[in-house]
Image: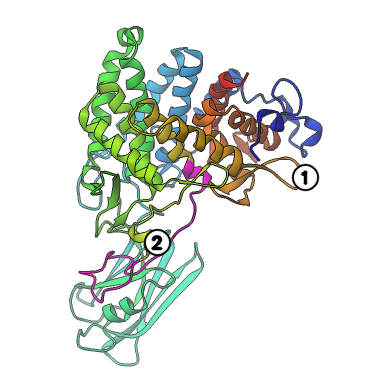
């Protein structure tokens, strides 16, 4: 049964009855998540410090030591500022956005003089540990590289490699221990002689992917020196990171280009940001592909240091970049952007399945892709699908609601741009939320499922992501009502135990969306 606004709102004024809620901090009862002052106060608090600040790089050299913080924290701050401007039409939010964007652009790889794994310094933002493949190169007693070990499982830099002597002079044992995932791999009596049945590369390949998704490459013959060695990662520029970071920046450009009043005040910045967005999305042109039927998607090219090199990217990662492409298409009318958006929309539309309730369901990995279908070793890395994962899948899980929010954001924006989808599609995406995502727990309190197909109940941390589906609210105000009910129940705040929460960035975006969506609630 589809939930309505009345199902989620128990008393007048859009607030769930406090008596029905579990105990919350004493100050929580005063929080109005649809109030402008809540966003403004928390935005000022965010500026005082904490994870995801705009002047910090996206790789793990930042102050927090966490890769991806521009993509998964600061991008939401920027998006929140865009949505607050759209709600209240106060240019103070655009001025705040400019302050942050200038800092974000200043830490692009090209500005910092750092490179990706190919040695290229590009106008985008690289990331590394814990996302990318780890490497350790073992050398002989003369310092000559002998064997390269590669771990495709995330958190590779938490792996220590120990080399000990084998029972024969020409053999050795490698032991890898990863403390983050608590997994160990040991290969004994290895040889660097390609003719030996114990040839290290062949033995490790035969056991792949294994607990740490370990592979190896021979550099030369010889016996590696004994000892303990770290595993390091190589940086990659992720399309989804580029998309998440540039989406609100491109939205600013779209807003300015569409308003004579804003053009008078902000045209110089809009022109600067347009160039920056064009350059950033162009970094991923080499990853873009189209099917024979005209569907667009992104791949991870083979030998890119990622677990599924040679495979299609998850749907949300292709559409993450697609969000920016929509805004650029609207701002510029560029035929190339319009064509790509239409192709990405066609791909996503082909992934959507209508369920019994006339809602949409879809998967995390694109159906018909290599990871979805699964792939096996060919006997040689040269002909394998993936260098770092010789065999993998099938992986057919439904899209989770957090990544699904990116998909819905793209679909609604593409629909608004008349570059894909129909009104019926929008109705079904709204029903995905109200029928499959939104629910109540055994106590009758507002709750959330973990995927677009329903499945299991999610924890409070899952519920906190719900307002990111707010783009569907114009087609059903119950989306906003349920998101507000979840926030009223769980009372998320920027601080936990006196420390700013890592999720502070998306919390700001969600409060902005609860403000933004309120205009659709009668």
- At horizontal 68% and vertical 26% (from top left) the residue drawn is 31
Magenta extent: 375-404
Mark number, residue 156:
2
Q: Specify whether residue 145 is painted magenta.
A: no
Residue 388: image quadrant is: bottom left
Residue 390 picture location, percent across and down: 31, 69
- Residue under the point 25% across and 82% down: 223
What residue sits 33% from the left and 15% below the top?
258
Query: Which residue ends up furthest to the right in the rendered image?
Result: 19
Q: Where is 176 relative to 356, above or below?
A: below
Q: Quadrant of residue 252?
A: top left
* Numbered disc 2: secondary structure: helix
Question: Please, is residue 116 above or below residue 473 in the view?
Answer: below
Of residues 480 and 120, the one nearer the viewer is 480
Provide residue 295's location: percent of width, then percent of height.
29, 44
Residue 402 is a magenta residue = yes
Nearer to me, 155 or 197: 197
Q: Position of residue 325 (x, y in %)?
A: 30, 33
Q: Quadrant of residue 370?
A: bottom left
């Amino acid at each position: 049964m589809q939930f309505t606004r009345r199902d989620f709102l128990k008393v007048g004024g859009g607030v769930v009855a406090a008596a029905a809620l579990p105990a919350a901090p004493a100050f929580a009862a005063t929080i109005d998540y649809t109030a402008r002052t809540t966003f403004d106060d928390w935005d000022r608090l965010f500026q005082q410090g904490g994870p995801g600040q705009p002047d910090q790089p996206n790789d793990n050299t930042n102050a927090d030591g966490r890769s991806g913080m521009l993509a998964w924290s600061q991008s939401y701050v920027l998006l929140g500022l865009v949505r607050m401007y759209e709600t209240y039409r106060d240019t103070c939010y655009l001025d705040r956005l400019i302050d942050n964007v200038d800092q974000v652009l200043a830490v692009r790889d090209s500005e910092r003089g750092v490179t990706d794994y190919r040695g290229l310094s590009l106008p985008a933002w690289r990331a590394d540990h814990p996302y990318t493949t780890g490497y350790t190169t073992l050398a002989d007693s003369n310092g000559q590289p002998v064997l390269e070990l590669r771990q495709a499982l995330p958190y590779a830099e938490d792996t220590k490699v120990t080399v000990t002597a084998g029972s024969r002079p020409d053999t050795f044992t490698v032991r890898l221990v990863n403390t983050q995932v608590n997994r160990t791999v040991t290969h004994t009596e290895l040889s660097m002689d390609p003719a030996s049945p114990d040839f290290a590369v062949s033995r490790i390949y035969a056991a792949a992917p294994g607990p740490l998704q370990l592979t190896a490459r021979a550099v030369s013959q010889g016996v590696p020196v004994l000892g303990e060695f770290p595993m390091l990662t190589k940086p990659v520029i992720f399309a989804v990171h580029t998309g998440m970071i540039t989406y609100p920046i491109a939205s600013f450009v779209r807003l300015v280009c569409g308003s004579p009043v804003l053009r008078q005040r902000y045209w110089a910045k809009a022109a600067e940001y347009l160039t920056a967005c064009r350059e950033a999305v162009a970094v991923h042109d080499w990853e873009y592909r189209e099917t024979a039927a005209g569907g667009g998607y992104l791949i991870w090219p083979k030998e890119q240091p990622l677990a599924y090199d040679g495979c299609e990217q998850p749907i949300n990662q292709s559409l993450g970049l697609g969000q920016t492409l929509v805004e650029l298409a609207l701002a510029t009318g560029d035929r190339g952007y319009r064509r790509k958006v239409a192709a990405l929309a066609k791909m996503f539309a082909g992934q959507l399945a209508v369920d019994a309730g006339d809602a949409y369901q879809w998967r995390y990995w694109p159906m018909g892709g290599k990871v979805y279908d699964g792939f096996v070793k060919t006997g040689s890395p040269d002909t394998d699908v993936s260098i770092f994962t010789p065999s993998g899948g099938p992986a057919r899980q439904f899209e989770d609601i957090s990544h699904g929010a990116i998909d819905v954001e793209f679909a609604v924006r593409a629909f608004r741009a008349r570059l894909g989808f129909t009104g019926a599609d929008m109705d079904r995406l709204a029903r995905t939320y109200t029928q499959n995502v939104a629910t109540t727990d055994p106590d009758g309190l507002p709750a959330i499922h973990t995927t677009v197909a329903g499945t299991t109940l999610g924890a409070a941390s899952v519920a906190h992501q719900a307002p990111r589906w707010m783009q569907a609210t114009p087609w059903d105000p119950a989306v906003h009502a349920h998101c507000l009910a979840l926030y009223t129940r769980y009372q998320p705040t920027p601080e936990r135990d006196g420390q700013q929460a890592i999720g502070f960035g998306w919390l700001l975006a969600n409060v902005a969306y609860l403000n933004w969506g309120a205009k659709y609630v009668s």
